[in-house]
Image: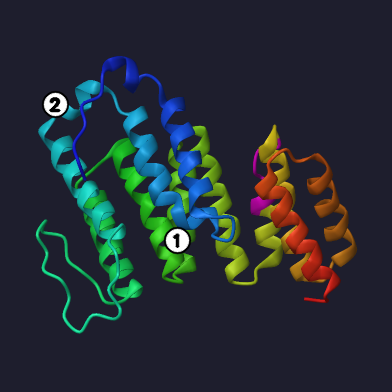
C-alpha cells in the first residue's frame, strides 16, 4: 500500500474519509453485503481518526505496517486458472483460491491486533470480523463485532459493526437475534430505510411476508437512494414469487 502523508487539517476531518468509503461501497455493488467490504471501509476511515503524532511512535509504526500487510493480502487478486502462481515482487503471497487468501488475511489481521492497542487494535479487529464472515466463521465474527461495538469508534464503523452482527445472526438462521441487531441500527436519514430494509428481509425469511411487504413498500416510497429502492423492489419480487 502506498504511503501518504496527511496534514493535521486532514487528520481532523474523518468525514472526508467516511465520504470516500461510501463511494467505495457504492462501487462494490448492491448485491454484496456491506459487511464483506467493511475492511475496505475501515482502512479508509482509519486515516481520518488517527492523530498526526501517533505515527511518530515506534510501536504504532509497526502496528500500522502489520495492518497494511494484512489489508494488502486481503486485496490480492486470486489466480484460480494458473498452474503456477505469478511471483511475488512485493513480499505479498499470491493465491489460487479466495478461501486461501481469506485464511491468510485472517491470520495477518490477528497479528496486527497482537501488535496494537487502543483504536488501532479495534479497527484491526473490525476488519478481521469482515474476513471471518466471508469465511463462514459467523460465531467468531460475531465476537469481533461485539468487541468493536464495546470499544466504540466513528459513527459509520459502529453502524457497520452493528449491521455485521445482524448478518452473522442471519447466516445462522437466528432470525430473532438478527432482527434485534438490525433494529438497533440508527433510524436517522437514509440509514433508517436501510435498517427497515434489513428488518423486512429477516421478517420475510421468518415467513412474516405481509409485514415484510409493508416495510419494503415504505422503503421504495420513502428512501432517496436509488440502489436501496432497487434492492427493496427485488425483495418484493422474490416474495411475490414465493421465494
Where is residue 80 drawn, in percent x and y?
A: 30, 78
Where is residue 38 drawn, in percent x and y?
A: 44, 50
Image quadrant containing the N terminus: top left
Judged from the image, the secondary structure of the residue bearing numbered disc 2 is: helix
Front residue of 134/173: it is 134
Judged from the image, the secondary structure of the residue bearing numbered disc 1 is: helix
**Exactly how many numbered labels are in the figure?**
2
Magenta-drawn segment: 181-187
187 relative to 63 in the view: left or right: right
Placement of 98 over or under 43, stated as above or below: below
Mark carried by residue 88: none
Placement of 128 over or under 118, stated as above or below: below
Q: Residue at x 15, y 71 (%)?
A: 86
Front residue of 59/69: it is 69
* Mark 2 or mark 1: whose residue is earlier in sequence: 2
Mark carried by residue 141: 1
**Whether residue 126 is visible:** no
Front residue of 157/92: it is 92
Q: Residue furthest bottom?
A: 83
Q: Which residue, given by chain and number where applicable, does mark 2 sit on?
A: 56
159 relative to 113 in the view: left or right: right
Q: Residue at x 81, y 40 (%)?
A: 222
Q: Residue at x 37, y 39 (%)?
A: 44
Amino acid at each position: 500500500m502506498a504511503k501518504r502523508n496527511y496534514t493535521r487539517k486532514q487528520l481532523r476531518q474523518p468525514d472526508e474519509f467516511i465520504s470516500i468509503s461510501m463511494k467505495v461501497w457504492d462501487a462494490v455493488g448492491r448485491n454484496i453485503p456491506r459487511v464483506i467490504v467493511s475492511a475496505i471501509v475501515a482502512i479508509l476511515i482509519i486515516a481520518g481518526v488517527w492523530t498526526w503524532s501517533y505515527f511518530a511512535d515506534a510501536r504504532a509504526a509497526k502496528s500500522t505496517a502489520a495492518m497494511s500487510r494484512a489489508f494488502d493480502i486481503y486485496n490480492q487478486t486470486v489466480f484460480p486458472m494458473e498452474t503456477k502462481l505469478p511471483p511475488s515482487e512485493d513480499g505479498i503471497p499470491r493465491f489460487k483460491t479466495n478461501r486461501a487468501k481469506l485464511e491468510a488475511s485472517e491470520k495477518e489481521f490477528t497479528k496486527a491486533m497482537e501488535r496494537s492497542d487502543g483504536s488501532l487494535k479495534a479497527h484491526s479487529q473490525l476488519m478481521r470480523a469482515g474476513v471471518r464472515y466471508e469465511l463462514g466463521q459467523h460465531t467468531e465474527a460475531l465476537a469481533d463485532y461485539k468487541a468493536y461495538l464495546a470499544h466504540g469508534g466513528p459513527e459509520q464503523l459502529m453502524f457497520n459493526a452493528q449491521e455485521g452482527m445482524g448478518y452473522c445472526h442471519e447466516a445462522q438462521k437466528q432470525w430473532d437475534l438478527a432482527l434485534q441487531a438490525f433494529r438497533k441500527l440508527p433510524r436517522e436519514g437514509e440509514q433508517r430505510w436501510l435498517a427497515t430494509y434489513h428488518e423486512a428481509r429477516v421478517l420475510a425469511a421468518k415467513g412474516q411476508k405481509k409485514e415484510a411487504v409493508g416495510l419494503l413498500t415504505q422503503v421504495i416510497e420513502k428512501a432517496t437512494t436509488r440502489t436501496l429502492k432497487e434492492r427493496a423492489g427485488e425483495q418484493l419480487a422474490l416474495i411475490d414469487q414465493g421465494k
